[in-house]
Amino acid sequence: MSPPDPITAAESPRALAALNAWLGERSASERVAWGLANLAGGHALSSSFGAQAAVSLHLVTQHKPDIPVILIDTGYLFPETYRFVDELTERLSLDLRVYRPQIGIAWMEARMGRLWEQGQDGLERYNRLRKVEPMQRALRELGARTWISGLRRSQSRSRAGIDFLQLHDGRWKLHPLADWSDRDVWNYLQANELPYHPLWHQGYVSIGDVHTTRPLEAGMTEEETRFFGLKRECGLHESWEGAGQAA
């Protein structure tokens, strides 16, 4: 049976649910192929170049080698992350598009202090300034009407209910790896001789900015390794209503 078409799914929650059920019966590779063929272009893939980023980068570029790959450079990434970006960009011949916040790190700190040390409100303002605004700008400038992301349900409680396909800020968002386990990721990396982020081997299970990322230690949950345990999401994959009013 053919799936509901995207236009119908955009207008009907029931059709969107049926489309997600259909996608759930396909492999991740088939989901990517279907999305590229049926969802509105342009298409773009985002990556934080985190612990297991090589999976989505390799999977999607096998179908569309020239897809724009968006990296949001907050200015506070680990040195190992920048080197990992260089390694994967060269190895996979990525069309890397780096977007940065409009305000530099020194100016931001002079004006607002260390936002990441100012509780949950400070973290949310930091994330809007240094992550959400650049991503909104990237998708807008690239004309992306379909955004592909490597989110997985097993990564955190906040992602446990993500669909393969959803509408986000007026565009399609496709999560072809949504139902993958850590074992699935490991098998794919091994089968395709792809690397983990170098900090993975030092106990970092989720890797973001240097000041809000900690290695996993005894007694901690994975969610406590980011943002001092105050929150899990950085805002990129949440509703953006009002997010542009950050400064």
Image: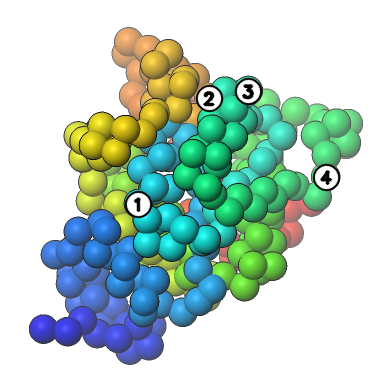
Dot 4 amino acid type: Ile
* Lateral position of residue 207 relative to residue 153, left or right: right
The residues tagged by marks 1 and 4 sit, at their Cα atoms, a distance apart of 34 Å
Dot 1 amino acid type: Leu
Q: Which of marks 1 and 3 is in front?
A: 1
* Lateral position of residue 146 relative to residue 129, left or right: left
Question: Where on the picture, by quarter, is residue 37?
Answer: bottom left
The residues tagged by marks 2 and 1 sit, at their Cα atoms, a distance apart of 27 Å
Would you call the spot at circle 1 few (<14 residues within 10 Å), some (14-19), or many (20 or more)?
some
Circle 1 sits on which residue? 59
Label located before the other in sequence (1 or 3): 1
Which residue shows up at 39% across the image and 47% down it?
Answer: 58
Q: Nearer the viewer, mark 3 or mark 2?
A: 3
Q: Which of marks 2 and 1 is in front?
A: 1
Circle 2 sits on which residue? 213
Q: In this view, does 233 lie above or below 70?
A: above
Instruction: Say what secondary structure mark 3 lies in.
Output: helix
Circle 3 sits on which residue? 79
Label located before the other in sequence (3 or 4): 3
